[in-house]
Image (cartoon, helix red, strand yellow):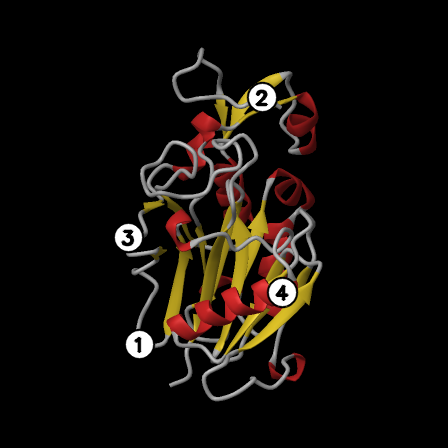
Amino acid sequence: MSAGTPDSPAIRVLGAEAVAGRRLEEQTDGMELRLREWEGSDLVAGITRARAGDYSVSTNGTDALLEAYGALARRLGFDAVAVPRQVHGTEVLRVDGAALAAPGGESAPAVLLAGRVDGLVTTRPGLLLVSTAADCIPVYLRDRAGRGVGLAHAGWRGVAGGILDRAVAAMTWAGARREDLEIHLGPGICGACYEVDAPVLDALGLGGERARVDLRGILASRALAAGVRAVTVSAHCTRCGAAGLHSHRGSGGQAGRMAAFIGARRT
């Protein structure tokens, strides 16, 4: 794959038509972008900006992860946080109270290292779910009836493998109805910046030798096909946008990772 740019020679963008009319812009709040349209008295959803630091799970040691994610959970008002070690796969884990170790003290949230999965769902208040990204798409899920939340990591391999459908299924297993689900496709690389070659196009079922691909557009189409009626798409691109986000392609592979997050605080 080569790294395309918005002003390089015209190459078709596949999937872009599916995002029309679905744009929803997260709001800047210091070190984070927040999904204010979803947030209320208890629900919190957003993503850290680059200025907040590097939340990479693969490059930070265990002590650093416990400190960084414990601090994030505390700042957002949670007593526990679940952190996956993402592998560009399609496994989705349901996390509940039984899976969590006791907090280390009144001011120290519990940090669950959730293993090699790319999606998490929970019905547990007080538990923050996170997902790391630096061009891949964070997929936020919530049940409008209050039966749970979910978060998944979708790069091209996850999109090709069906991570969105697995996350929707996990939410229904947790008690949600598809017609009550909402999905938001968060900040990620836009179609104008994401140029791929034949192996990726084949994996996505698109064909061709070279094209630009809007991963959020493909995910939006799949969410609608899965029976989810409410689907929105972030207006932010990690590579060409001005929100100050980590971008793997934009940095030549040197970027850190942002932490997408969602959870319901205890009330």
Q: Amino acid at mark 1?
A: Ser
Q: CA distance from mark 4 to mark 2?
A: 34 Å
Tell me, yes or no, whether the two marked residues, 4 and 2, touch with CB atoms within 8 Å.
Answer: no
Q: Amino acid at mark 3?
A: Thr
Q: CA distance from mark 4 to mark 3?
A: 30 Å
The first of marks 4 and 1 along the sequence is 1
Quarter of the figure with the C terminus: bottom left
Q: Position of residue 248 (x, y in %)?
A: 53, 37
Q: Position of residue 247 (x, y in %)?
A: 48, 38
Q: Secondary structure at mark 4?
A: helix
Label 2: few (<14), some (14–19) or many (≥20) C-alpha neighbours in 10 Å: few
Tell me, yes or no, whether the two marked residues, 1 and 3, touch with CB atoms within 8 Å.
Answer: no
Q: Amino acid at mark 4?
A: Ala
Location of residue 152 by image quarter: bottom right
Location of residue 121 by image quarter: bottom right
Write down the residue under mark 3: 28
Label 1: few (<14), some (14–19) or many (≥20) C-alpha neighbours in 10 Å: few
* 81 left or right of 182 in image: right
The disc placed on residue 2 is 2
Q: CA distance from mark 1 to mark 2?
A: 44 Å
Label 4: few (<14), some (14–19) or many (≥20) C-alpha neighbours in 10 Å: many
Q: Residue at x 53, y 70 (%)?
A: 176
Write down the residue under mark 4: 170
